[in-house]
Image: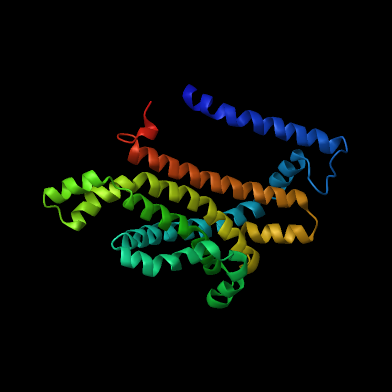
Protein backbone atom coordinates (compact mmCIF):
# COMPACT_ATOMS: atom_id res chain seq x y z
CA UNK A 1 0.00 0.00 0.00
CA UNK A 2 2.78 2.40 0.94
CA UNK A 3 4.68 1.57 -2.26
CA UNK A 4 1.56 2.26 -4.37
CA UNK A 5 1.08 5.63 -2.65
CA UNK A 6 4.73 6.58 -3.18
CA UNK A 7 4.45 5.72 -6.88
CA UNK A 8 1.28 7.78 -7.26
CA UNK A 9 2.45 10.84 -5.31
CA UNK A 10 4.98 12.26 -7.85
CA UNK A 11 2.29 12.33 -10.56
CA UNK A 12 -0.37 13.71 -8.22
CA UNK A 13 1.62 16.76 -7.10
CA UNK A 14 1.89 18.45 -10.56
CA UNK A 15 -1.79 17.70 -11.22
CA UNK A 16 -2.89 19.36 -7.98
CA UNK A 17 -0.58 22.35 -8.51
CA UNK A 18 -1.73 22.94 -12.10
CA UNK A 19 -5.40 22.52 -11.13
CA UNK A 20 -5.14 25.05 -8.31
CA UNK A 21 -3.16 27.44 -10.52
CA UNK A 22 -5.77 27.32 -13.31
CA UNK A 23 -8.57 27.82 -10.79
CA UNK A 24 -6.84 30.91 -9.39
CA UNK A 25 -5.94 32.35 -12.80
CA UNK A 26 -9.52 32.05 -14.07
CA UNK A 27 -11.07 33.50 -10.93
CA UNK A 28 -8.53 36.36 -10.96
CA UNK A 29 -9.48 37.20 -14.54
CA UNK A 30 -6.13 36.34 -16.12
CA UNK A 31 -7.79 33.62 -18.20
CA UNK A 32 -11.27 34.01 -19.65
CA UNK A 33 -13.69 31.38 -18.34
CA UNK A 34 -15.23 30.84 -21.80
CA UNK A 35 -11.79 29.78 -23.07
CA UNK A 36 -10.64 27.65 -20.11
CA UNK A 37 -13.29 26.98 -17.46
CA UNK A 38 -12.20 26.75 -13.81
CA UNK A 39 -11.69 23.15 -12.66
CA UNK A 40 -14.43 23.65 -10.06
CA UNK A 41 -16.91 24.37 -12.88
CA UNK A 42 -15.81 21.25 -14.74
CA UNK A 43 -16.32 19.17 -11.59
CA UNK A 44 -19.73 20.74 -11.03
CA UNK A 45 -20.71 19.91 -14.61
CA UNK A 46 -19.55 16.32 -14.22
CA UNK A 47 -21.68 15.90 -11.09
CA UNK A 48 -24.74 17.63 -12.55
CA UNK A 49 -24.63 15.93 -15.96
CA UNK A 50 -23.25 12.61 -14.72
CA UNK A 51 -26.10 10.42 -16.10
CA UNK A 52 -25.58 11.80 -19.60
CA UNK A 53 -21.79 11.71 -19.36
CA UNK A 54 -21.75 8.19 -17.91
CA UNK A 55 -23.99 6.89 -20.70
CA UNK A 56 -21.71 8.54 -23.27
CA UNK A 57 -18.61 7.11 -21.55
CA UNK A 58 -20.12 3.62 -21.68
CA UNK A 59 -20.75 3.91 -25.43
CA UNK A 60 -17.25 5.25 -26.08
CA UNK A 61 -15.76 2.47 -23.95
CA UNK A 62 -17.53 -0.22 -25.97
CA UNK A 63 -16.34 1.25 -29.28
CA UNK A 64 -12.76 1.91 -28.13
CA UNK A 65 -12.29 -1.43 -26.38
CA UNK A 66 -13.78 -3.43 -29.25
CA UNK A 67 -11.63 -1.60 -31.79
CA UNK A 68 -8.58 -2.10 -29.58
CA UNK A 69 -9.27 -5.82 -29.18
CA UNK A 70 -9.61 -6.22 -32.95
CA UNK A 71 -6.41 -4.27 -33.57
CA UNK A 72 -4.55 -6.36 -30.96
CA UNK A 73 -5.60 -9.68 -32.49
CA UNK A 74 -5.31 -8.53 -36.09
CA UNK A 75 -2.08 -6.59 -35.56
CA UNK A 76 -0.29 -9.49 -33.87
CA UNK A 77 -1.49 -11.93 -36.54
CA UNK A 78 -0.37 -9.63 -39.37
CA UNK A 79 2.97 -8.98 -37.66
CA UNK A 80 3.61 -12.73 -37.35
CA UNK A 81 2.60 -13.22 -40.99
CA UNK A 82 4.94 -10.47 -42.19
CA UNK A 83 7.84 -11.94 -40.20
CA UNK A 84 7.63 -15.24 -42.05
CA UNK A 85 9.40 -14.03 -45.20
CA UNK A 86 11.35 -11.06 -46.53
CA UNK A 87 9.34 -11.32 -49.75
CA UNK A 88 6.06 -11.10 -47.82
CA UNK A 89 7.39 -8.07 -45.92
CA UNK A 90 8.31 -6.26 -49.14
CA UNK A 91 4.95 -7.14 -50.71
CA UNK A 92 2.56 -6.29 -47.87
CA UNK A 93 4.26 -4.06 -45.27
CA UNK A 94 3.79 -0.86 -47.35
CA UNK A 95 0.04 -1.47 -47.19
CA UNK A 96 0.21 -1.78 -43.41
CA UNK A 97 1.87 1.63 -43.30
CA UNK A 98 -1.30 2.99 -44.93
CA UNK A 99 -3.05 2.80 -41.56
CA UNK A 100 -0.40 5.11 -40.11
CA UNK A 101 -0.16 7.65 -42.89
CA UNK A 102 -3.82 8.34 -43.77
CA UNK A 103 -5.45 10.80 -41.32
CA UNK A 104 -8.51 9.19 -39.75
CA UNK A 105 -10.49 12.41 -40.08
CA UNK A 106 -10.04 12.17 -43.86
CA UNK A 107 -11.51 8.67 -44.14
CA UNK A 108 -14.09 8.93 -41.33
CA UNK A 109 -16.84 10.02 -43.78
CA UNK A 110 -16.09 6.91 -45.83
CA UNK A 111 -16.49 4.77 -42.72
CA UNK A 112 -19.97 6.23 -42.25
CA UNK A 113 -20.83 5.37 -45.87
CA UNK A 114 -19.52 1.82 -45.45
CA UNK A 115 -20.74 1.03 -41.92
CA UNK A 116 -23.52 3.56 -41.29
CA UNK A 117 -24.02 5.80 -38.28
CA UNK A 118 -23.46 4.32 -34.84
CA UNK A 119 -21.25 1.81 -33.11
CA UNK A 120 -19.82 0.02 -36.15
CA UNK A 121 -18.28 3.23 -37.49
CA UNK A 122 -16.79 4.00 -34.06
CA UNK A 123 -15.26 0.52 -33.84
CA UNK A 124 -13.87 0.75 -37.37
CA UNK A 125 -12.34 4.16 -36.63
CA UNK A 126 -10.71 2.89 -33.42
CA UNK A 127 -9.41 -0.18 -35.26
CA UNK A 128 -7.90 1.75 -38.20
CA UNK A 129 -6.09 4.20 -35.92
CA UNK A 130 -4.69 1.65 -33.48
CA UNK A 131 -3.63 -1.35 -35.55
CA UNK A 132 -0.34 -0.11 -37.02
CA UNK A 133 1.66 0.15 -33.74
CA UNK A 134 0.76 -3.47 -33.00
CA UNK A 135 1.85 -4.63 -36.44
CA UNK A 136 5.11 -2.65 -36.36
CA UNK A 137 6.12 -3.67 -32.84
CA UNK A 138 5.22 -7.33 -33.36
CA UNK A 139 7.26 -7.48 -36.55
CA UNK A 140 10.19 -5.60 -35.02
CA UNK A 141 10.21 -7.80 -31.92
CA UNK A 142 10.15 -11.07 -33.85
CA UNK A 143 12.89 -9.93 -36.24
CA UNK A 144 15.08 -8.84 -33.30
CA UNK A 145 15.55 -12.39 -32.00
CA UNK A 146 19.17 -13.11 -31.06
CA UNK A 147 20.81 -14.88 -34.07
CA UNK A 148 22.79 -17.11 -31.70
CA UNK A 149 19.58 -18.43 -30.16
CA UNK A 150 18.08 -19.03 -33.61
CA UNK A 151 21.18 -20.99 -34.58
CA UNK A 152 20.89 -23.01 -31.38
CA UNK A 153 17.30 -23.95 -32.18
CA UNK A 154 18.31 -24.86 -35.73
CA UNK A 155 21.18 -26.97 -34.37
CA UNK A 156 18.74 -29.01 -32.30
CA UNK A 157 16.45 -29.52 -35.30
CA UNK A 158 13.60 -27.25 -34.23
CA UNK A 159 11.01 -26.62 -36.93
CA UNK A 160 10.28 -23.03 -38.06
CA UNK A 161 6.93 -23.07 -36.25
CA UNK A 162 8.53 -24.35 -33.03
CA UNK A 163 11.22 -21.67 -33.30
CA UNK A 164 8.53 -19.02 -33.79
CA UNK A 165 6.30 -19.96 -30.86
CA UNK A 166 8.96 -21.10 -28.40
CA UNK A 167 11.67 -18.51 -29.09
CA UNK A 168 10.86 -15.63 -31.41
CA UNK A 169 7.33 -14.79 -30.25
CA UNK A 170 8.06 -14.98 -26.49
CA UNK A 171 11.16 -12.85 -27.05
CA UNK A 172 9.04 -10.28 -28.88
CA UNK A 173 6.50 -9.94 -26.04
CA UNK A 174 8.04 -6.77 -24.54
CA UNK A 175 7.81 -4.95 -27.87
CA UNK A 176 4.35 -6.34 -28.59
CA UNK A 177 3.12 -5.02 -25.25
CA UNK A 178 4.69 -1.65 -26.01
CA UNK A 179 2.72 -1.59 -29.25
CA UNK A 180 -0.45 -2.44 -27.31
CA UNK A 181 0.18 0.46 -24.90
CA UNK A 182 0.39 2.86 -27.84
CA UNK A 183 -2.62 1.27 -29.53
CA UNK A 184 -4.74 1.63 -26.39
CA UNK A 185 -4.47 5.42 -26.37
CA UNK A 186 -4.93 5.62 -30.13
CA UNK A 187 -8.07 3.46 -29.94
CA UNK A 188 -9.71 6.00 -27.64
CA UNK A 189 -8.72 8.82 -30.01
CA UNK A 190 -10.07 6.89 -32.97
CA UNK A 191 -13.34 6.18 -31.16
CA UNK A 192 -13.82 9.88 -30.36
CA UNK A 193 -13.14 10.87 -33.99
CA UNK A 194 -15.57 8.21 -35.17
CA UNK A 195 -18.20 9.62 -32.82
CA UNK A 196 -17.70 13.11 -34.24
CA UNK A 197 -18.86 11.75 -37.59
CA UNK A 198 -21.01 8.77 -36.65
CA UNK A 199 -22.69 10.18 -33.54
CA UNK A 200 -23.10 8.93 -29.94
CA UNK A 201 -20.61 8.71 -27.08
CA UNK A 202 -18.26 11.30 -25.67
CA UNK A 203 -17.37 12.54 -29.14
CA UNK A 204 -20.98 13.51 -29.72
CA UNK A 205 -21.11 15.21 -26.30
CA UNK A 206 -18.01 17.24 -27.16
CA UNK A 207 -19.41 18.22 -30.55
CA UNK A 208 -22.78 19.34 -29.16
CA UNK A 209 -21.21 21.16 -26.20
CA UNK A 210 -18.88 22.98 -28.60
CA UNK A 211 -21.78 24.35 -30.61
CA UNK A 212 -23.41 25.48 -27.34
CA UNK A 213 -20.20 27.21 -26.15
CA UNK A 214 -20.21 24.90 -23.11
CA UNK A 215 -16.46 24.65 -22.60
CA UNK A 216 -17.01 23.25 -19.10
CA UNK A 217 -18.87 20.29 -20.59
CA UNK A 218 -16.27 19.89 -23.32
CA UNK A 219 -13.54 19.66 -20.67
CA UNK A 220 -15.61 17.21 -18.62
CA UNK A 221 -16.06 14.89 -21.61
CA UNK A 222 -12.38 15.17 -22.59
CA UNK A 223 -11.37 14.37 -19.01
CA UNK A 224 -13.51 11.23 -19.03
CA UNK A 225 -11.98 10.18 -22.36
CA UNK A 226 -8.53 10.65 -20.83
CA UNK A 227 -9.52 8.52 -17.84
CA UNK A 228 -10.65 5.79 -20.25
CA UNK A 229 -7.29 5.93 -22.03
CA UNK A 230 -5.41 5.81 -18.73
CA UNK A 231 -7.47 2.83 -17.58
CA UNK A 232 -6.64 0.95 -20.78
CA UNK A 233 -2.96 1.88 -20.40
CA UNK A 234 -3.03 0.63 -16.81
CA UNK A 235 -4.58 -2.66 -17.90
CA UNK A 236 -1.78 -3.22 -20.44
CA UNK A 237 0.79 -2.39 -17.75
CA UNK A 238 -0.80 -4.97 -15.45
CA UNK A 239 -0.76 -7.52 -18.27
CA UNK A 240 2.91 -6.72 -18.90
CA UNK A 241 3.74 -7.29 -15.26
CA UNK A 242 1.96 -10.64 -15.23
CA UNK A 243 3.69 -11.83 -18.41
CA UNK A 244 7.20 -10.39 -17.97
CA UNK A 245 7.93 -9.94 -14.28
CA UNK A 246 9.66 -13.33 -13.85
CA UNK A 247 12.20 -12.88 -16.60
CA UNK A 248 12.35 -9.42 -18.15
CA UNK A 249 14.83 -6.79 -16.93
CA UNK A 250 12.25 -3.98 -16.92
CA UNK A 251 10.58 -5.53 -13.87
CA UNK A 252 13.71 -6.32 -11.90
CA UNK A 253 13.99 -4.66 -8.48
245 relative to 147, above or below: above
The x and y percentages for residue 106 are: 62, 69
Asked which quadrant contains residue 90, the reply is bottom left
Residue at position x 49%, y 47% in the image: 232
Instruction: State whether residue 180 is above or below residue 111.
Output: above
Residue furthest to the left in view is: 156
Residue 66 seen in this snapshot: no
Q: Position of residue 59 (x, y in %)?
A: 56, 58
As rendered, which of 124 and 87 lies closer to the eye? 87
User: Which quadrant is the C terminus positioned in?
Assistant: top left
What residue is shown at x 78% (from left), y 45% (from top)?
A: 36
Which residue is drawn at the image coordinates 83% and 45% (left, top)? 33
Q: Residue furthest bottom?
A: 113
Q: Position of residue 73 (x, y in %)?
A: 38, 59
Q: Position of residue 228 (x, y in %)?
A: 56, 48
Residue 214 visible in image: yes
Amino acid sequence: MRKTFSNFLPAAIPFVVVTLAVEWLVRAGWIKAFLVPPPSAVLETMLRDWPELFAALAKTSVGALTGFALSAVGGIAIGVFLSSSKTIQRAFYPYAVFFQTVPIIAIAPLLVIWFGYGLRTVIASAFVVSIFPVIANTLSGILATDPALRDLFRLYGASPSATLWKLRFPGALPQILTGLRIAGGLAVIGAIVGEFIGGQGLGSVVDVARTQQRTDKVFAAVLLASVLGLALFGFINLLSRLLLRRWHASFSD
